[in-house]
Amino acid sequence: MDVFEAILRRRDVRNEFSGEVLDDERLTRLLRAAHSAPSVGNTQPWDFVVVQDRDTLARFAGHVGRCRDDFAASLPEDRKDTFNPIVIEGIESSGTGVVVTYDPTRGGKNILGRHTVDETGHLSVALAIQNLWLAATSEGVGVGWVSFYHEDFLKALVGVPEHVHVVAWLCVGPVTEFQTVPDLERFGWRDRRPLEDAVHRERFMN
Ligand SMILES: Cc1cc2nc3c(=O)[nH]c(=O)nc-3n(C[C@H](O)[C@H](O)[C@H](O)COP(=O)(O)O)c2cc1C
């Protein structure tokens, strides 16, 4: 699969995990793709915690379910009806969670490129995630990004040190199919903006 095809086929997967647990060889290939990402000052500030213990997956799924309920309760009635049928995670059905973290101390104090824009550290980790996501797509493996959690809960669950941040829980596993239309579009939550609305020439505002 070429890179454009992987970009266009990539989906956030929640419902389509096959139930088969990803083998170590393919998982390592995906983690190597993530670890090949560009990073500010070449700091490689990411780490990956692979979680396959059924009890840990169930505990995280329970926490995410409670966060989902809190979000649903915060919505106006019409949005609640749109949100309710949308599945927001495949934590147990994927069989594998990859917790991606960001260590702001990696590389010491003088990070080449981060001295004026601190967010470049977090952005580097996002690029590692996107690498993994595209590599997974090209192998017929699904990825679903879960952000319905409280960071302290997840840090305690998988033993992340105090100074390290959690960036994502990724559900990773073989899929039966990739949807062609993102779930949030299919269920009427939000559509992709036209490219013309996102591209500006010379100045953002005239
Ligand atoms: C930072 C980030 C956090 C996300 N968190 C969630 C989440 O908690 N649950 C979920 O179902 N999808 C989550 N998503 C996936 C988006 O909903 C999805 O990417 C978007 O709807 C577009 O769909 P597509 O990825 O299939 O193109 C997240 C995506 C990103 C980039």
Image (spheres, helix red, strand yellow):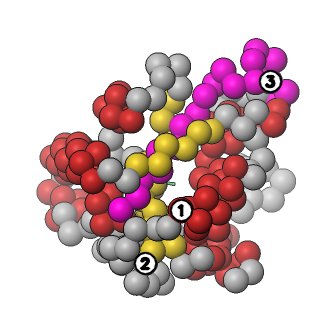
**Does 75 appear above or below 114?**
below
Q: Position of residue 93 (x, y in %)?
A: 30, 66
107 left or right of 5 in image:
right
Identify the secondary structure beneath mark 1.
helix
The residue at the point 45 percent across, 74 percent down is: 174
Tell me the quarter of the image containing the N terminus.
Answer: bottom right
73 left or right of 39 in image:
left
- Mark 3, residues whose alpha carbon is within 10 Å: few (<14), some, or many (≥20)? some
How far is disc 2 from disc 1 in space, using C-alphas?
16 Å
Q: Position of residue 52 (x, y in %)?
A: 37, 53
Residue 32 visible at all: yes
Identity, as a three-letter code, of the amino acid under mark 3: Ile
Q: Which residue is mark 1?
A: 24
- Answer yes or no: do the residues labelled 2 and 1 have beta carbons within 8 Å? no
Instruction: Specify the quadrant of the image occupied by residue 118.
Output: top right
How far is disc 3 from disc 1 in space, using C-alphas?
33 Å
Label drawn at residue 175: 2
Q: Which residue is mark 3?
A: 111
Identity, as a three-letter code, of the amino acid under mark 2: Val
The residue at the point 63 percent across, 43 percent down is: 125
Q: Position of residue 89 (x, y in %)?
A: 32, 60
Indicate which label's residue lies in the foreground, 2 or 1: 1
- Answer yes or no: do the residues labelled 3 and 1 have beta carbons within 8 Å? no
The magenta region covers: 95-113
73 left or right of 201 in image:
left
Identity, as a three-letter code, of the amino acid under mark 1: Asp
Q: Is the residue indicated by label 2 positioned so its CB lies within 8 Å of ligand 1?
A: no
Earlier sequence position, callout 3 versus callout 1 = 1
Residue 196 vs residue 38, the one in the foreground: 38
Q: Main secondary structure of the magenta part?
A: loop
Instruction: Specify the quadrant of the image occupied by residue 83.
Output: bottom left
